Amino acid sequence: MSFFDRFRKKKKDAPVAKEAKKSAASAPVASGVVCKTKTPESIEANYMHAADLGELLPGAPPNGKIKLAIYWAAACGGCDVSLLDTNERILTIGDMADIVMWPIAVDGKEKDIAEMEDGSITVAIISGAIRNSENEHMAKLLRQKSQIMVSYGSCACFGGSPALANLVAGGSKELLDYAYQKVPSTSSFQADYHPDAPVMPQTSYAAPEGELTLPVIYDRVKTLDQTVDVDYFVPGCPPLQETISHMLKAFVDFVYHGVPLPPKGTQIGVTTSSLCDQCPRTKEYRRITEIKEPFQVDVDPDLCLLDQGILCLGPATVGGCNARCTIAGQPCRGCYGPTKAVQEHGASALTAIASLFPVLEDDGIIGEDKIMDIMSTIKDPLGYFYAFTMAKSLIKVAVNEKGGQ
Ligand code: SF4
Ligand code: SF4
Ligand code: SF4
């Protein structure tokens, strides 16, 4: 049974949310827009099937094992776990590659990498954003030592959640002040134990045993490709197994069968259109007069979430995850990043949503005040529209009134 068949069965078996249907049905449809009903065939055509990786234990490659480094920069560890989640396919990785560094799973050290010949690592997979001097140093070192570099996960590709800190005017000083002095737990700690001079992290400390150092936190979080040259991008927070299978297949085909790798710059494991084309919910382009949280709505299992007033970034987000969240009744937050045609993920999402506001005369509700009323129902708009892509956005950082970060 295909994924889509499973979803259709679930919907058929699910009790219909009558009140939600009634209220959604009463919302006006955008004038001049022909309602579009997606077909199972069109959704199936956009479905991202997992790549067939062939024999589970193919043995060592004909030209010997490749060398693989996996590293996390400013990351939560979820991307590493997604690689471990490949289950028995981890054996294929083990057959194909010697893992020379993987902080979460293998005991490789920075000095071991530094001693290797330049270009002697075949593939480096890096997750996480570039937040501090250690992240930057490791990204540059691995770039120097590796033939192929993969930006893995949304933090590495777009800045991810760490880059939301770019919205704090005042840069790293303000961030450290906030974390070490202003949040309730640290402020009470400082008041109790260091009332005269709060203890703050130092980048260097002369201990009796020698100098201790910590990385320098940067004012602005960057993506991996804003720091070093990147060959491939694998988005997702974290990338899903279907997506990972396409990355692994590219390497397996290359290493075992001599198949050329995809062109440099390829985003691996995504479709050519938006998430909406993978989403089985019916889109009717209903007018939005209020933005609601999912818990405020008795969610209709069939209807587009935007049609129900729930903020969904599907129209601006590239397909690849097979609409994991929207099928479960949760809106897309955009973790796969924008489609290829879009530079500004947040602005594109905002445009798609604004096009559903009742601004035409036929809608009977017009005027700037009303638009502002609707907009004001969006809680934390920057945090919502740029949850994953702030470092790649045109905004990039917040500045204070004097123009400083
Ligand atoms: S992309 Fe998501 S899962 Fe990966 S490191 Fe960032 S926050 Fe964690
Ligand atoms: S806006 Fe969201 S819920 Fe609606 S069709 Fe697109 S992805 Fe699905
Ligand atoms: S639906 Fe959106 S937020 Fe959820 S996994 Fe897919 S791209 Fe990410």
Image (cartoon, rainbow, N blue to C red):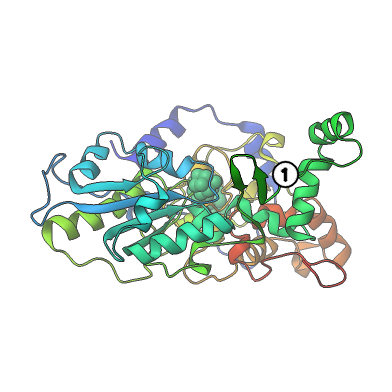
For the N terminus, the quadrant is top left
For badge 1, the amino acid type reads Lys
Residue 208 x, y percent position in the rendering: 64, 39
Q: Nearer the viewer, residue 191 or 128?
A: 191
Q: Is residue 187 above or below residue 75?
A: above
Task: Please tell me which residue is depicted at 49% across the width and 72% down the height of the picture.
Answer: 341
- Res 169 quadrant in image: bottom right
| Element carrying mark 1 | loop
Q: Is residue 248 left or right of residue 284?
A: left
Q: Is residue 77 left or right of residue 220?
A: left
Q: Is residue 222 above or below residue 108?
A: below
Please indicate, yes or no, whether residue 130 appears anywhere in the rendered image.
Answer: no
Task: Please tell me which residue is depicted at 84% across the width and 41% down the height of the picture.
Answer: 198
Residue 379 x, y percent position in the rendering: 77, 49
Q: Is residue 134 above or below residue 94?
A: below
Disc 1 crowd, CA 10 A, few/some/many (<14, 14-19, 20+): some
Q: Is residue 363 left or right of residue 98?
A: right
**How many labels, in total?**
1
Q: Nearer the viewer, residue 29 or 167?
A: 167
The residue singled out by tag 1 in the image is 292
Task: Please tell me which residue is depicted at 53% across the width and 26% down the height of the picture.
Answer: 15
